[in-house]
Every structure is written in structure tokens, then in C-alpha cells.
């Protein structure tokens, strides 16, 4: 378990709960003038059942709050992979969280800490964080792509988070880019199949087998292994990243043409492999996207680095408070 926290002068707090398939992070931030400073956090492996996980998260948040007893918690934000219902606060059987079927994730935190809690899809939460405090600050139309274990998008359109009719907006990983190719999101040749850690590993393993490179099969089964080989100048590894870059450009061209964003922010693998992905990505983007739309759009790596998930959960809390306040004003008008 990792924990870090400074001393406690009086401040207003937001709490963030980032729930992943293998690990969870509980964080505490100070809200001031629309900005949030990440003050402390604890990380731990995701417990085996939802009940165990919720209890562990509540205990962790209680410890973080005890370090500054004079301060007041304003809200809790929960970030989790979909499908989910942000309106009802339900986690609805995400593929990376088996057994989390119709879980009411917000009520336990609201009862335990006496503050409102808000739920966001993890890609949406990261989009909010990058828009509020990261690479997308100051924009009105922005797309965030996760590009990690899987691939999903969070959409900021006309200065607002866009969730869609049932919290399923931005599932860009499901778009089919080719009739054949690595499987991602349950679909061969999908955007996620080509542009995710899992997809890159499947592509690497298949190419190693296809070319009879048995000695490379295990190393090339993960994106990290392929990156390690690329660092040593391995030509097949470099070709895999070129292929990934080209398919990334193809997928982005669709987002550019449909959404006309001024900025596309990409996290995780793009952040670490930009030097290998950017040139083939841009070649395809220039060929496939509408020139006028592309001229108005930049593609950049995420600005919040490895703490993006924590900032995403905190942004879910802050955005939830803002939406609640806005709705109250509209009801009173």
C-alpha cells in the first residue's frame, strides 16, 4: 500500500475513489478557486468482492481524513470502467470487474461521510481532469483517449462533458477499423484491438508466431515487452509500433471528422511511446481526415501523467458538485 500526505491546515476537501480491475486508489484533494491539489492517496489491490472493496475504500478514506481533522469533506467522486449509470450511481457489470453487477457504489460513501457522492465512467473522469487542469485546460471541444489496457474516449463538447443517452458515449474502442486484426472490445480489427496494451500484445504474439520467431513469442505478448524490444532496436517491435501508429491515425481521423475537436489528448501508452507513434499517426491523419477540421485540431499526450486516475476521480467530485448546484438554480428559476 502506498500512502503520502502532508500536514493539515484548514482546507476544503474532495475525495476520489478510482476503481480498477487490478488496483484501487483513494485520494484526497484540496479544492480552491476551481483548482484541485492532490494532497494524499492510498493504493491497494482491488479486493475480491464489491463488499470487501467498499469497506477497504471507506477505511482508507477515513485514514486520509484523520490526518486533517479540522477540515471538511465536500464530496466524493468515484471513477470506474463502464457500463454504469452515473445518474443512479450503479456499476453495471464492467468486464474488468467480475461480480460487480448492479452495485450501488455511492450510498455507502454518502452514509459513511455525510456528503454527496458522484460516479463517472473512468474515461469521462480523465477527460474532465485533463480539461480542467491538464493538457485540455482552456478548450471547449476536446476528446480524451485512454489508450491503456483498453481504449475509450471521454468527450468534452461545447464546454460540457457529454455522456450520451445511457452513459455509453465515447466507446470509440468498439469502432471497427479493419475486417481483420487483433480482438479488442470483443471485435476483431477494432480501434481497441489495434490501440491498447492488450491489442498490441496480441498483435505482437501473432506476428512472432507468423514469422516463426518462437524465441520472441513470450516477450512480444505484452506491450511492455514490445516496447523493451523496440528500445533495443528490434525491427519487428518497431514495425508493430508503426502499425499501431497508423491505425491510431485512422481511428483519430474518424473522431476529427465527426466531432471537429480542437484538441485530442491521449494517455498512457501514447504518453510513453509518442516518439514511435506520432509520425505514422500523422501520416494517416493527413491522408484520411478532412483538411479543414484537421487544421483546427492538435493531438497531444496527457498532461497529468501517472496521477491522472486520481485527478479523474477528484474531477468527478468537483463536476458533480457543479452540476448539482446548476440543477438547483434551474429548479429555483
Image (cartoon, rainbow, N blue to C red):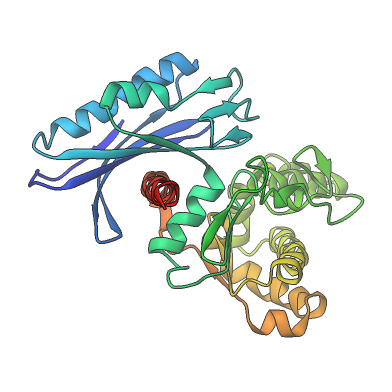
Whether residue 310 sits left or right of residue 279 in the image: it is left
In the image, residue 233 lies at what x, y percent? 63, 65
Residue 230, visible in the rendered structure:
yes
| Residue nearest the viewer, comparing 177 with 144 | 144
Position of residue 292 measured from the top left corner of the image (x, y, whole percent): 73, 85
Q: Quadrant of the N terminus?
A: top left
Residue 64 sits above or below residue 282 on the image: above
Image x and y of residue 92, in percent: 61, 27
Observer-nearest residue: 245 or 212? 245
Looking at the image, which residue is at 86% across and 50% down? 211
Q: Residue furthest front?
A: 333
Q: Residue at left 63%, top 71%?
A: 261
Q: Is residue 57 visible?
A: no
Q: Picture quarter containing residue 276? A: bottom right
Q: Is residue 10 left or right of residue 172?
A: left
Q: In front here: 261 or 149?
A: 261
Identify the residue at image location x=73%, y=43%: 215
- Give the percent coordinates (x, y) of residue 60: 28, 27
The residue lying at 73 percent from left, 42 percent from top is 217
Amino acid at each position: 500500500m502506498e500512502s503520502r500526505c502532508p500536514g493539515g491546515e484548514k482546507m476544503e476537501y474532495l475525495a476520489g475513489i478510482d476503481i480498477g480491475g487490478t488496483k484501487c486508489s483513494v485520494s484526497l484533494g484540496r479544492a480552491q478557486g476551481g483548482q484541485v491539489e492532490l494532497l494524499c492517496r492510498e493504493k491497494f489491490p482491488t479486493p475480491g468482492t464489491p463488499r470487501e472493496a467498499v469497506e477497504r475504500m471507506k477505511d482508507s478514506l477515513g485514514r486520509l481524513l484523520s490526518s486533517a481533522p479540522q477540515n471538511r469533506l465536500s464530496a466524493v467522486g468515484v471513477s470506474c470502467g463502464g457500463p454504469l449509470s452515473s445518474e443512479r450511481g450503479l456499476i453495471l457489470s464492467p468486464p474488468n470487474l467480475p461480480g460487480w453487477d448492479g452495485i450501488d457504489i455511492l450510498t455507502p460513501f454518502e452514509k459513511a461521510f455525510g456528503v454527496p457522492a458522484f460516479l463517472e465512467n473512468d474515461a469521462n473522469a480523465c477527460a474532465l481532469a485533463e480539461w480542467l487542469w491538464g493538457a485540455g485546460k482552456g478548450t471547449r471541444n476536446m476528446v480524451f483517449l485512454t489508450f491503456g489496457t483498453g481504449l475509450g474516449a471521454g468527450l468534452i463538447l461545447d464546454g460540457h462533458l457529454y455522456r450520451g443517452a445511457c452513459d455509453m458515449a465515447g466507446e470509440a474502442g468498439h469502432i471497427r477499423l479493419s475486417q481483420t486484426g487483433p480482438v479488442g472490445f470483443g471485435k476483431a480489427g477494432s480501434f481497441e484491438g489495434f490501440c491498447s496494451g492488450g491489442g498490441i500484445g496480441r498483435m505482437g504474439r501473432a506476428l512472432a508466431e507468423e514469422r516463426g520467431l518462437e524465441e520472441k513469442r513470450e516477450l512480444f505478448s505484452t506491450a511492455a515487452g514490445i516496447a523493451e524490444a523496440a528500445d533495443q532496436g528490434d525491427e519487428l517491435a518497431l514495425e508493430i509500433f508503426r502499425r499501431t501508429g497508423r491505425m491510431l491515425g485512422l481511428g483519430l481521423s474518424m473522431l476529427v471528422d465527426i466531432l471537429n475537436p480542437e484538441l485530442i489528448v491521449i494517455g498512457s501508452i501514447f504518453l510513453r511511446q509518442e516518439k514511435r507513434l506520432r509520425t505514422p499517426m500523422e501520416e494517416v491523419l493527413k491522408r484520411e481526415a478532412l483538411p479543414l477540421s484537421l487544421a483546427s485540431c492538435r493531438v497531444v499526450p496527457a498532461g497529468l501523467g501517472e496521477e491522472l486516475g486520481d485527478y479523474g476521480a477528484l474531477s468527478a467530485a468537483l463536476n458533480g458538485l457543479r452540476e448539482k448546484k446548476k440543477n438547483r438554480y434551474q429548479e429555483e428559476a
